[in-house]
Image (cartoon, rainbow, N blue to C red):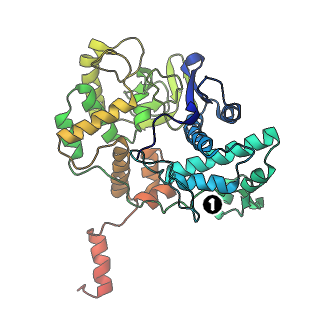
Amino acid sequence: MARSRVVLGDLRVQVLKRSGGIRSYTIVRADCSVVEEADSYLRMFEGSGSQKTYAYALVDHLRWRAREGLTTETTGLLDLKRYMGAVGAQVPMPYGQPWRVPPQRPYGASALQVAAAALKGFYVDACTRRGVNEELRQALSVTRLPTRLDRSRAFLGHVKSSMPANPLTQKRPQRRRHPKMLPDGAKPGLLEVANTARDAMVVRWLSDTSLRIGGLTGLHLVDLHLRENAACGECKSPHLHVCHRGGNPNRAAAKIKPDWRMVDGVITGGEIYRVSPAMISSYFKYMTTEYAKYATGHGMLLIQLAGANTGGPWSADAARGMLKRAGQRAELPGRITPKAFRHQITNDVLDVSNDPLVAKAVGNWASAQMVDEVYGHADLHSPQFTAALQAVWGEQE
């Protein structure tokens, strides 16, 4: 039997709109009073995307805590482990009634990592500020020996003797070696069934770059340098700059936040992606037809073409929905997601170049090592692979 949508205590996440369109997140009760413990913790992440993520992870735990009749003073480490078990973690102990029941699904590996980080940070902060539950604070403030990777990442890592640990964290499963790619024929199939020039441009831009959907839907016209030797001086070829902006009206934001600025109307910095001639062609087709007809003065690239907000900025969720419907019309297997395009081009570039550094630069990935681990694999039908096996088998003449 599904749990009621009305939560105990009516705790909820409250979005606060700041000047400049920036949003902050806190947790409030049914009478709109702020939960001070949660607010104090979330203020530590003001201005970052982590604030929203931790707010929604934390409000779920506080609702569970209300059902269990616990407070910060009475919560113990075993209680937190019971909660982790109730939301989907594997814990070697009875945890009581599951908290996430159909139609909700248990947390996956990534969500469990987020929940563990949010709970540790919240309780360490609350116990320290209020001077209560020292036992729980000490239980959460454990350390571990540094790994070789920890030492290489840290400044003066060779002198590190310990690293912070989290007793609530689950052991992460092995990284999936072959991420989900696009089905065969996805690109031409999606282009064939695209209903608008905007939709075709989105398919083309996702296919020919490794853009994330938040970065694509957050683009402004000033971010596009679609000609040779643009005034920014950062790339001789046509390119675009993905700039993190917290105040976009469609709430789209780039995941990565390198510094950027505008000088004399020219954008510099941010994430730089080279663009293909086909991308430029699709851009001008869209701009001279649909954009010119419907756009308002917001300056963003992608706009809504129907509905009450026609001409307004197009959201990332709307773009995901468009890709899903287009995949169904093209009768492609599975659900078409923006991330699959990013995986596909990284895999294709690595196959052609056989150089993780090139694939890293194309995809703006964090490291070439990660690219090699995830996407690097031998082609079982390549001439080199076949020749190597034949040499070992003694079948070469």
* Closer-to-camera residue (381/268): 381
Q: Residues within 10 Å of mark 1 (few under 14, many from 20)?
A: few
Answer left or right for 367 relative to 215: right
Residue drawn at (27%, 26%) of the image: 198
Residue lying at 23% horizontally and 26% vertically, measured from the top left: 197
Q: Quadrant of the C terminus?
A: bottom left
Please indicate whether residue 395 sits to the left or right of residue 215 in the image: left
Q: Amino acid at mark 1?
A: Leu
Asked whether residue 229 is in view, the answer is: no
Q: Which quadrant of the structure image shows residue 168?
A: bottom right
Q: Is residue 30 left or right of residue 266?
A: right
Q: Nearer the viewer, residue 47 or 148?
A: 47
x%, y% of residue 158? 74, 61
The vertical placement of 3 against 389, above or below, is: above
* In this picture, residue 312 sits left or right of residue 94: left
Give the secondary structure at mark 1: helix
Give coordinates of residue 45: x percent, y percent: 65, 34
Give residue 244's position: percent from left, percent from top.
52, 30
The answer to whether any part of residue 75 appears in the image is yes
Q: Is 72 drawn above or below residue 199 in the view shown?
A: below
The percent coordinates of residue 297 (x first, y second) are 40, 11
Q: Nearer the viewer, residue 219 or 114?
A: 114
* 244, above or below 148, in the image: above
Residue 36, quarter of picture: top right
Q: Which residue is mark 1?
A: 149
